[in-house]
Amino acid sequence: ACVNVTAGSDPLSESAYSLPSTSGRTGDCNGSGACAYYPFGTVCVSQTCSGNTLYYSDTCSGVGACVDNGSAPCPGHLVCQDATNCRTTCTQDSHCVSGYYCASGSCQVKKATGNTCGLGNECVTGNCVDGYCCNNTCTSTCMACNVAGSLGTCSAVPNNTDPINECGLCKVCNGSGACKNVSAGSDPKDECALDDPLTCQKNGNCNGSGACALYASGTVCIAQTCTVGTGVKYYTDYCNGTGTCQDSGSVSCEPYACGTNNDCRSNCTGDSNCFSGYYCVSGICCSPVVGNSGSTCGTGTAYSYTHNNTTPTGTDVTANIVPTTAERWFRFTTIEYLNDMNVWIWFTSNPGDEFRIEVHYNTVSSTINTCAAKTKATGTGSCTGEYTNYSWAHGGTYPWTSNDSNTFYVRVYRKAGATPTCNSFTLRIRVGGGQPWT
């Protein structure tokens, strides 16, 4: 009797073979008296990947058909890695489908204008400008994509601003897409240093012409000084407007010294308030006239004058007395060629009747308030009183060929109770002639 050939064999070579892709016969018997088909689930078409679509493997139906198992997009918006498989991660934008970019290994949807961004590949427009996805490249001066109220749209930067410093020193945007000079007296971008006025350089503001302003002409660069104890006042120095501190010079405070207010004094309370060589007298700094001898009575070394009767007009000595406790000494040597000739000593100028004289003839005693030998008109007595004039007459007969030389020491001082001043007196001595005063 006939029996079915065992499945999986074909001893009589009756079952034709065909490829799995045709879902045909396997080339064996099925054990039921027929040719065997590829079993259910046998891959008849292998999996493929194209673009970003994965085509699943097709399988046999078990009854001679190849079943289409369909397709699907690659997951995560990725594209195919090769002809068979999808990518599972990305390292660049090309690993993502259109409209996506790669970020940290995954594909992210590109951003619309107005969203924040870091790079242009994040944006639909491809333009990441000023931190926002922008509608264009926005490269013109004073245009930006981060203008408040217009984020993502290339717009003019607001007036008087320059957020990315594209206009340069002391310039800002004008609100219409162009640059302009910063107004004088302001520095909105804090570009101009504030130098010390001593330098007369930058004053911390712009000058209105696209540069930093210098300290204006008339700005004090060095204040007036007058150092206590000195006698020179240095005037205030001023900037000239072009960067130079102009020296205004100095002036002597003479007869006063500098005060405590950086100015010359106008009065004094002591000699230290006066210019060198001056003395404080009743609140006024006085300068010695003809110096200040300070010599002791009788030496007469500072001032010496010789007179004779051939010049009866006399000789003047002008001086004053400073400080208030001082006195002045003068030595006069007279030579007489005629008999019974007078010597006259008197003030021709004595302002305020302030000064008095004391006259010593030939020698002076150790006590300056008394006189030796002949004094006054009579040739005897004391000269301790306060005198404003003095006369001396020599008696006897002298031939023309003889001379009579006499020395007079004159002490000038203030009368008792006189208010000290800077006034100068003029003292005159004359040999011969009549009494000169009334």
Image (spheres, rainbow, N blue to C red):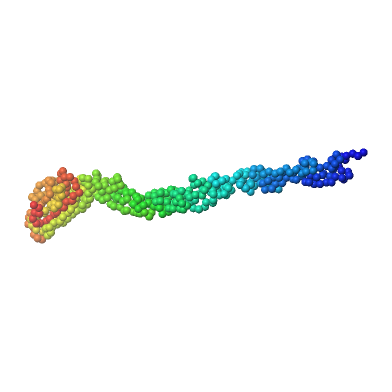
Q: Residue at x 85, y 41 (%)?
A: 34
- 8 sits left or right of 297 in the view: right
Residue 229 seen in render? no
Residue 143 lies, in percent from the top left, at 49, 51
Q: Nearer the viewer, residue 43 or 239?
A: 43
| Residue 262 visible within the image | yes
Q: Give the x, y percent position of residue 349.
A: 14, 52
Q: Residue at x 30, y 45 (%)?
A: 261
Q: Nearer the viewer, residue 244 or 402?
A: 244
Residue 188 left/right relative to 403: right
Residue at figure coordinates x 21%, y 52% from the top left? 289
Residue 168 in percent (x, y) is at 46, 53
Compared with 7, 287 (above or below) is below
Extreme residue in the right direction:
1
Count of marks, rendered view: 0
Give the quarter of the image for residue 32: top right
Front residue (pair 203, 427): 203
Relative to 357, is 40 above or below? above
Give residue 179's position: percent from left, percent from top: 45, 53
347 or 308, nearer to the observer: 347
Q: Which quadrant is home to the N terminus?
A: top right
At a point 49% along the width and 49% down the height, the residue shown is 155
Position of residue 127 relative to residue 62, above or below, is below
